[in-house]
Amino acid sequence: MRLVLLGPPGAGKGTQAVRLAEHFSCPAVATGDIFRSHVANGTPLGRLAQEYLDLGDLVPDEVVIEMVMERLSASDCDNGFVLDGFPRTVTQAQALDAKLAAAQVPLDAALFFEIREDELFRRLAGRSATLHRSDDTEQTIRHRLEVFAIKTRPLIDYYERLGLLLRVDAIGEIDDVTKRILEGLDQRST
Ligand code: ADP
C-alpha cells in the first residue's frame, strides 16, 4: 500500500501513519521526524533544516525531495510506505509522481485529514505542553497553519484530479479515525 497523508499540523497524521504502516506491514516515513533527528544529531542536514523548523517554514523543496527520494529507494519501501508530511508542495508531489511512474508503481491514495481550527489549537497546545517541540508555540502554530493553507492546500485539488483523494474526518477517537480510514480504503478498492 502506498499512501500519502495530507492535513494541517495537529490533525493526527503522525499517529495514524504509524497505525496504518503496522496494518499494511510497511514503513511510516515522517519527514518532520527525520528532520528532528538530524537536528538532534547535529548533522549538516540538521544544521540546514533547523532554522526552517524553528520558524515553522518549509525546508526548501530540493532538500526535502532528495532526502525523501533516497528514503523511498530503500528496500523496505518496495512493498509500500505511508508518507507523513510529504508532499507538502506541488513541486514535491510532482517529484513523487515522477519517481513512482519511473518505478511503475502507483500511489493508492492521498488521505486528507479534515479538522476544524479550534480543535487543532486545542490539540497543539496539549502537545506543546507534553512533548516540548520547539515549533509548537502559538505564534509558530499560526504560521504553520498559514503555510499549510498556502503551500499544501493546493495538493487537495491535485490529488482529487488524479482520483486519489480520500477525505477523512479526523475528529474523534484515534481508533475510530483508523477505522474510518481502513473502511474508506476498502471502498475505494472495490
Ligand atoms: P506538523 O505536521 O505538525 O507541522 P511535521 O513534524 O510534519 O509537523 O514537520 C515539522 C517541520 O518539518 C515543518 O514545519 C517543516 O519545517 C519541516 N518539514 C517536514 N516535512 C516537510 C516537507 N515535506 N517539506 C518542507 N518542510 C518539511
Image (cartoon, rainbow, N blue to C red):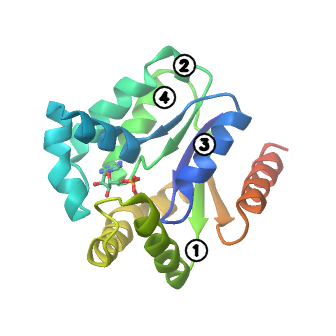
Q: Do labels 3 and 4 touch, CB within 8 Å?
A: no
Camera-near label (3 vs 4) is 3
**Residue occupying the far right of the picture:** 190
| Mark 3 vs 4, N-terminal side | 3
Q: Residue 76: give its label.
A: 2
Please tell me which residue lies in front, 77 or 157: 77
Crowdedness near tag 3: few (<14), some (14–19) or many (≥20) residues, C-alpha within 10 Å: some
Question: According to the image, label 1 marks what residue?
Answer: 115
| Location of mark 4 (residue) | 101
**Disc 3 marks which amino acid?**
Val
Q: Quadrant of the C terminus?
A: top right
Residue identified by numbered label 3: 18
Pinpoint residue 2: horizontal percent, then vertical percent: 60, 35
Q: Amino acid at mark 1?
A: Ile
Q: CA distance from mark 3 to mark 4?
A: 25 Å
Structural distance between the alpha carbons of marks 3 and 1: 19 Å
The span from disc 2 to disc 1 (Cα, nearest Å) is 32 Å
Is tag 3's residue or tag 2's residue first in the polypeptide sequence?
Answer: 3
Q: Which residue is at a point 45% across and 58% down the rendered structure image?
A: 155
Looking at the image, is 60 positioned above or below residue 56?
above
The image shows a total of numbered marks equal to 4
